[in-house]
């Protein structure tokens, strides 16, 4: 019986990366980390990084696409830009890219903030100050900034009093 020759390591790394990308978008850093764990014998500099850079050149992996998908996913789950930025920062994305996907091309955070507030709480026009502070703390923990929180609460209270 003849043995099947082992695949070259670059092809193996590429195939594994493409399998991961077929499930969902990944950042370059995430892919590198996962492949390093899966193939500890492969050299990062000689095998893994060139394979991932080739995927980037072929536009099969894109940090921008990953960031856009991540922002869309987390914002629909009720999280604000500060929390999402912190999560994306840990994935080693460039700060210019974060600004682009969060603020320039991102959702209207005041609207997202108001939706989260309406979903979680019963908003009354005559809400007490302690209740409003409770809403603010909740939204701050979700990663929204003070300006968006203030505008969202104001617009919701104005709509309730009309």
Image: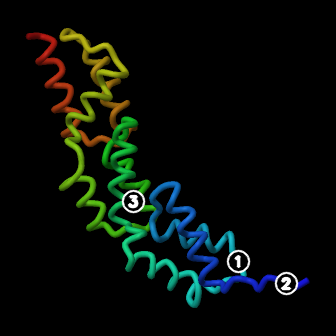
Foreground mark, 2 or 1, reads 2
Q: Is residue 41 left or right of residue 48?
A: right
In this view, the residue in front, 95 or 24, is 24
The image shows residue 160, relative to residue 24, as above or below, that is above
The figure's colour scheme reads rainbow
Sequence-earlier tag: 3 or 2: 2
Secondary element type, mark 2: loop
Residue 105 horizontal side relative to residue 68, left or right: left
> Mark 2 or mark 1: which comes first in sequence?
2
Q: Mark 3 points at which residue?
A: 66
- Most distant residue in the front direction: 1
Which residue carries the number 2 mark? 3
Which is in the foreground here, disc 3 or disc 2? 2
Q: Residues within 10 Å of mark 3 (few under 14, many from 20)?
A: some
Residue topped by disc 1: 40
Distance (Cα) linking label 3 and label 2: 40 Å
Mark 3 vs mark 1, CA separation in Å: 25 Å
Residue 78 placement: quadrant: top left
Residue depicted at 19% across the width and 40% down the height: 147
Q: Is mark 1 on a helix, strand or loop?
A: loop
Q: In this view, does 46 lie above or below 63?
A: below
Q: Is residue 43 left or right of residue 118?
A: right
Q: Closer to the camera, 115 or 134?
A: 115
Q: What element carries label 3?
A: helix
């Amino acid at each position: 019986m003849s043995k099947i020759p082992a695949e070259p390591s670059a092809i193996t790394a590429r195939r594994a990366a493409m399998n991961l990308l077929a499930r969902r978008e990944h950042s370059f850093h995430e892919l590198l980390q996962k492949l390093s764990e899966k193939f500890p014998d492969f050299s990062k500099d000689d095998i893994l990084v060139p394979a991932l850079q080739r995927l980037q050149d072929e536009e099969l992996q894109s940090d921008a696409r990953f960031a856009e998908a991540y922002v869309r996913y987390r914002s629909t789950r009720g999280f604000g830009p500060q929390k999402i930025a912190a999560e994306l920062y840990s994935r080693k994305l460039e700060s210019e890219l974060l600004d682009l996907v969060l603020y320039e091309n991102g959702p209207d955070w005041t609207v997202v903030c108001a939706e989260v507030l309406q979903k979680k709480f019963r908003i009354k026009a005559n809400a007490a100050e302690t209740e409003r502070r409770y809403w603010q703390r909740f939204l701050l923990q979700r990663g929204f900034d003070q300006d968006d929180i203030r505008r969202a609460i104001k617009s919701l209270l104005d709509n309730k009093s009309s």
